[in-house]
Image (cartoon, helix red, strand yellow):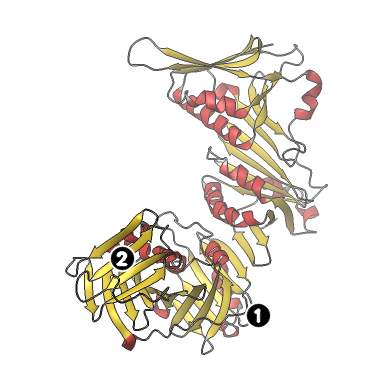
Amino acid sequence: MKFRAKIVDGACLNHFTRISNMIAKLAKTCTLRISPDKLNFILCDKLANGGVSMWCELEQENFFNEFQMEGVSAENNEIYLELTSENLSRALKTAQNARALKIKLTNKHFPCLTVSVELLSMSSSSRIVTHDIPIKVIPRKLWKDLQEPVVPDADVGYFVIWLCESCYPWSFFSFCLPFLRLCKILNLQVIEANLDGELNLKIETELVCVTTHFKDLGNPPLASESTHEDRNVEHVAEVHIDIRKLLQFLAGQQVNPTKALCNIVNNKMVHFDLLHEDVSLQYFIPALS
Amino acid sequence: MPLLTQQIQDEEDDQYSLVASLDNVRNLSTILKAIHFREHATCFATKNGIKVTVENAKCVQANAFIQAGIFQEFKVQEESVTFRINLTVLLDCLSIFGSSPMPGTLTALRMCYQGYGYPLMLFLEEGGVVTVCKINTQEPEETLDFDFCSTNVINKIILQSEGLREAFSELDMTSEVLQITMSPDKPYFRLSTFGNAGSSHLDYPKDSDLMEAFHCNQTQVNRYKISLLKPSTKALVLSCKVSIRTDNRGFLSLQYMIRNEDGQICFVEYYCCPDEEVPESES
């Protein structure tokens, strides 16, 4: 098992730092999956985190100038590591204005992810800061639990997709935040959407009933074309979720997506898929039973 | 605002005893924040506007007046419409799109109330996104009548608020009372506290630049519970001028003049009853 990677481009370095910060906000510990062309940050919390899961994917070549890896074996050319996400984001904090960043897998008494940051200095001699982040190598037999979550098919539960282009999702999220703060008192919320591209957020308490309507969000081609005729049974999908989970997800966003997708699986889950050029982040919030 | 216009068409305005529309919701929410020191408030609407009242301990009362002219549309079907509401929830709803929105974006509001037993409906719109809030109303409670009559006013001072702002924000809260001295002679206008670390006196000279008007006829020394007056700081911070009046019974009236974002003037008024009788000799 070997892994060694290097970033020298400032913009890539910055982007990578922001992603690791976001991951740290979303998950305490996460799994890092290293494969020849991709890096994945994975959270597969079955129960402890209320069933929230996350799947973040980066194309290796968009970030790294050098990338060498050798998996467990030739046929399973992958590495799965478990690490405390805050340790990584803390190690990368110094890297923001650095000249170069090196990450490699080492064994110093215990397995480590060694992050070395080469900092600029006034004189010609450069300084290097090294962090050793303790990790756990996840054995082959546990890999099956860490695969990309599947969004249930339309035949399992009716689902509606909401899609936005360009910066629009961001304004949606900034709208959401005060609303969500208000409903923190009550951790139950309904997200409801229909095929006309309308999304409603609702809360109901004894004191107040609040509904926010987002219109003209649009359905992606997938939702409107594929199985449209099967869908006309119901026109609305809705799901009750724990508001704190959504809040945590929205508050952790540091990468402005160019596209945002929200799948609502009736009474099952909400699935967010955010796309930012070379990074995709999927987040699953299960329905409250 | 597609939904709003649709709503307007759909509903007969006649069914509502109160309909009010605002282009900028902050013209309402800012004023209400100035009196938000208790959970509940009583609202009175007449054709002149809305008065929102908050009371505490039967000793202090705050009134916010939002006159009909502030609203772009204001209709009251009955002579007066009264209901009690959870002010915290109302303010949360009014600031649902954020309390300090991005420049150039305004949140529009349409407020409807059908009558006794019905919820207060708020339709808020910003950038094409509409939020509908139904806030349950409660049985109105009788509010205090301080019987504060301008003919009984003995002393009156109008100050620019900045002169009082610092004094109020730094009040010695270990003191139980705030003593206000108003007099035609020295010390003219004095604020005193008596706390653990000693007494402090703050004097405002009669000819100070901050003093807009000074009409004192008789020396009056009155004490007010500091815990009751402290919440008025919220209104003070927003205001540009404050009028301080006391009547023959020692009741205090603080009137704050608040200029909203559109330059219109609103008033917030605090009434407070004195804490105890103070012997004439003490000052």
Q: Is residue B89 left or right of residue B145?
A: right
- What residue is shown at x 78% (from left), y 59% (from top)? A234
Task: Determine whether A100 is above or below B40 in the image.
Answer: above
In the rendered picture of this protein, how many numbered marks are placed on residues? Answer: 2
Q: Earlier in the sequence, mark 1 or mark 2?
A: 1
Q: Position of residue B64 (x, y in %)?
A: 44, 74
The amino acid marked with disc number 2 is Leu
Rendering quarter of residue B178: bottom left
Which subunit holds the residue at mark 2?
B
Q: Which mark is residue A13?
A: none
Looking at the picture, tell me which residue is in the foreground, A150 or A207: A207
Residue closest to the eye, B220 or A144: B220
Q: Residue at x 75, y 52 (%)?
A: A228
In the rendered image, residue A150, in percent from the top left (x then y), is placed at 76, 37
- Secondary structure at badge 2 equals strand
Residue A197 in view = no
**Which element type, helix, strand or loop, lies under badge 1?**
loop
In the drawing, what numbered circle is on residue B117?
1
